[in-house]
Image: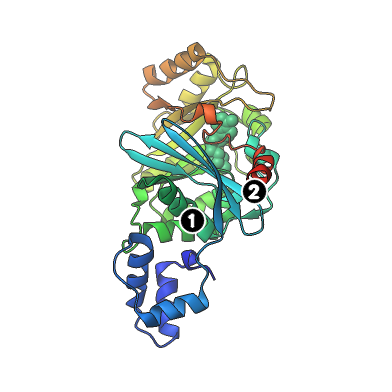
Amino acid sequence: MNIFNMTFPALEDYFTERGENKAKAKIVYNHIYRQVGELSENVNKMLKADFDFGNVEILKTSSCLDAVKFLFGLEDDSTVEAVLMRHDYGNALCVSTQVGCNMDCAFCQSGVNKKTRGLHSFEMVLQLLKAEESTGEKISRVTLMGIGEPLDNFDNVMDFISIIGHKHGLALAPRHITISTCGLPKLDELYNISCNLAISLHAPNNSIRSRLMPVNKVYDVERIINFTREYSKVKNKKITLEYVMLAGINDSDECAYELVVLIRGINCYVNLIPYNETSLDFKRSSSDRIKSFYSILIQSGIRATVRREFGGELKAACGQLSSERAQCADKERT
Ligand code: SAH
């Protein structure tokens, strides 16, 4: 067992089952996540006997002014990446949820390596702790937008959110955590949590979306829009629709108008993402094209933003976490 895999209730159960006071869970959470208080000799001994504390190692960091990219090595020698982004309102960490990804989006470099497994919760928690430790900077927001599809690793992702959200630990408020998903049927199970939701729409119709995202066969545009309409109403919460701008594919004025009709009246906003070019055969829309698309949305009363870019020179922006990393890891280890 890894201690960072333990949700607060699971840690309480651990102590109760051993005839100890469950209040010790609070002491442990305070100690490991807030460096507050001391552990008694007895608790220390129990933890040392029953738990691992590590197994995620920083193999490499690259930084520029507004971002730091981390390459992490895991116990089984696989690697994942995370990116710390410095906003003026605080630091956000873009966390990976899987080793590789099976969603196979045509434009996404992360999907070039097929998924080998979902990350354990502790491997997500440790991305956060190690990033804080290595930079000495506090992380106040988490986005699940690194390598992998969060809903394809549902239980571990839910535990991760519970662990980092717990008030006796890191206490990251749900409004500071964003799950980004391409839309799997598990989306319908997200009514119980209060994190922010971002859905990768990327097209105003099924014909374009199916070409870009195979997942559209199981969770198509209508389903996403129905979910967004319903969820935002029931939870009284705005959903973000992500829309990566791919030259000549989904960035025409016609596409913008089609998108307006699709989402009009729904409590959502569109985040236009300038494509980070990869080795794949897609080009970024020109800034004039992005401006024109954006203007159509705004003039039609749709809320929209163009995503600020971080760490472009590091090839570190979310969604561009690259398959080159395997070679990189080898170099760093030797
Ligand atoms: N699987 C999840 C989360 C990971 S990707 C999802 O699909 O939402 C995070 C976002 O980055 C997604 O919207 C994804 O489509 C987008 N993305 C992937 N590759 C990109 C690239 N090269 N440039 C810009 N955005 C990209």
Reading the chain from its start, which is encountered first: label 1 or label 2? 1
Along the viewing direction, whichever of 94 and 181 lies nearer the viewer:
94
Q: Label 1: which residue? A: 126
Q: Residue at x 49, y 33 (%)?
A: 242
**Label 1 element class:** helix
Along the viewing direction, whichever of 114 and 266 lies nearer the viewer:
114
Relative height, residue 307 to residue 318 (above, below): above
Relative height, residue 225 to residue 177 (above, below): above
**Label 2 element class:** helix
x and y, in percent, of residue 150 in the image: 54, 49
Determine which quarter of the picture holds residue 85. Answer: top left
Count of labels in the image: 2
In this rendering, would 240 be left or right of 104?
left
Q: Which dot, 1 or 2, sits closer to the camera?
A: 2
Determine which quarter of the picture holds residue 93. Answer: top left
Determine which quarter of the picture holds residue 56. Answer: bottom right
Name the image quarter holding the N terminus: bottom right
x and y, in percent, of residue 43 in the image: 39, 79
Q: Residue at x 56, y 26 (%)?
A: 276
Relative height, residue 53 to residue 321 (above, below): below
x and y, in percent, of residue 149 in the image: 58, 46
Q: Label 2: which residue? A: 333
